Image (cartoon, helix red, strand yellow):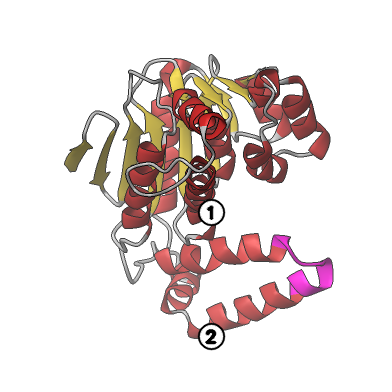
Amino acid sequence: MSASNIGPIMRHWIRNGIGTIALANKVNRNALSFHTLDVLHNQLRQFLDDPSVKVVILQSDIENVFSSGHDLKEIQKLQMRHQTNSNDMDEDGVVARDRLRRLFELCSDTMQSISTSDTPVIAKVDGVATAAGCQLVASCDLAYASDRSIFATPGVNLGLFCSTPAVALGRSVASPKHAMEMLLTGRGIRAADAERIGLINRAVSVGELNARVQKIAEDVASKSRDAVKCGKPLFYRQMELDLSQAYDVASRAMVNDVLDQEDCREGIDAFLSKRTPTWKRT
């Protein structure tokens, strides 16, 4: 196992095909500032582009906090600079409106890098995940949380609707009404309710969380990398199509996999021969 620190805000390591990114900024409760998002986006891209990484875990090193969302102090500074002089430029020659636009674009790019990658990403949550922190959980392919965790999109309480978190939240939960209740009231929900509405896969005890996520990650990492690489992007693609188009795309993919994928030939032969398959890339 190799581990690296990125200043005081993040740690990352790879072990047995499992890449782990741990948010570690105790000072601002893992707030997703521009700098933090930039580092997170780059580290995600490194893991997601690394063929040796079969699955990624996103977690927090800070007790009782996953992520508190965007850095409101950073946003307030931009707000005040814009109110004082909307044409005032920072040291990079960028006005407040453009800087804020870049912040939300970077956040959106970070979230989309998860769903558009062919590598599964698991959120491991033990504590509060609010606003963009909740968005990060909703963007992951799988999510598990301790029973003391809280999820919220409280922007409406600040006079700011959580519009960008709503994109991921609305696509994650079982019904738009569940998302709207969180967005319109700003109230937090406990892990059990997050499981009930589909925001997370499972709520477990604090003591069980690490073992549960590790077991899931190991299970995913043990599968054919080629099968997962083909299957994850196809799943999200077909969800955007109507039923007949989805079946057409999925059927053609299965034909290609059966006839062209070495791992598929190995897997079927192993099953029929009653032996454990040996995948091409392990």
Q: Secondary structure at mark 1?
A: helix
Q: Check disc 2 and report the residue beneath it.
A: 259
Amino acid type of disc 2?
Answer: Leu
Q: Position of residue 18 (x, y in %)?
A: 32, 47
Residue interval drawn in magenta: 239-247
Q: CA distance from mark 2 to mark 1?
A: 31 Å
Q: Check disc 1 and report the residue beneath it.
A: 112
Q: Is residue 185 above or below residue 47?
A: above
**Taken as a whole, is the magenta stretch helix, strand or loop?**
helix
Q: Nearer the viewer, mark 2 or mark 1?
A: 1
Q: Is residue 169 magenta?
A: no
Task: Report which quarter residue 37 is drawn in.
Answer: top left
Q: Is residue 65 above or below residue 231?
A: above
Give the position of the C terminus as an image quadrant.
bottom left
Amino acid type of disc 1?
Answer: Gln
Q: Is residue 21 above or below residue 261?
A: above
Q: Is residue 141 shown left or right of residue 198?
A: left
For the point 42% across and 34% down, the residue is 33
Q: Nearer the viewer, residue 168 or 191?
A: 168
Q: Nearer the viewer, residue 98 or 275?
A: 98
Task: Report which quarter residue 79 is drawn in.
Answer: top right
- Mark 1 Cα shell of 10 Å, populated few (<14), some (14-19), many (≥20): some
